[in-house]
Image (cartoon, helix red, strand yellow):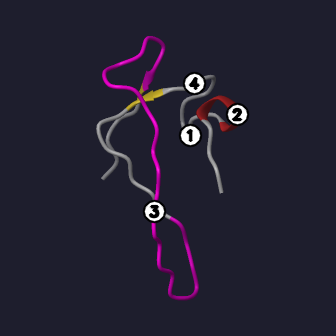
Amino acid sequence: MRWSGSADGVPGKAGADKVYARYVKVEFPVNVWVFLDEIEVLGIDGKESGAAVLPPTP
């Protein structure tokens, strides 16, 4: 599965296509054992103009 902010939007931020974040959490529900070899998260160094700021979630 591939997620794109510009195509899929940002959850909780209507109209946003970029998010300013320090960490990225990836979750996916499964019913069996799953082994994941690699996840790639792309971004830029620093804060890009127009990036939405999301509040931390507990």
What secondary structure is the stretch in magenta mostly built from?
A: loop
Q: Which residue is mark 1?
A: 11
Q: Quadrant of residue 51?
A: top left
Judge whether residue 31 is colored magenta: yes
The stretch of residues the image draws in magenta is 28-52
For residue 16, the mark is 4
| In this rendering, the label closer to the viewer, 1 or 3 | 3
Q: Which residue is mark 2?
A: 7
- Amino acid type for the residue under numbered disc 3: Glu
Q: Which residue is mark 3?
A: 38
- At 63% from the left and 22% from the top, the residue drawn is 15
- At 62% from the left and 38% from the top, the residue drawn is 4
| In this rendering, the label closer to the viewer, 3 or 4 | 3
Q: Along the line of sight, which residue is nearer the eye, 15 or 5?
A: 5
Q: How busy is the neighbourhood of tag 1: few (under 14 within 10 Å), some, or many (20 plus)?
A: few
Looking at the rendered structure, the secondary structure element under dot 3 is: loop
Looking at the rendered structure, the secondary structure element under dot 4 is: loop
Looking at the rendered structure, the secondary structure element under dot 2 is: helix
Closer to the chain start, of discs 1 and 4, is 1
Q: As drawn, is 45 to the left or to the right of 27?
A: left
Quadrant location of the N terminus in the rendered image: bottom right
| In this rendering, the label closer to the viewer, 4 or 2 | 2
How many marks can you see? 4
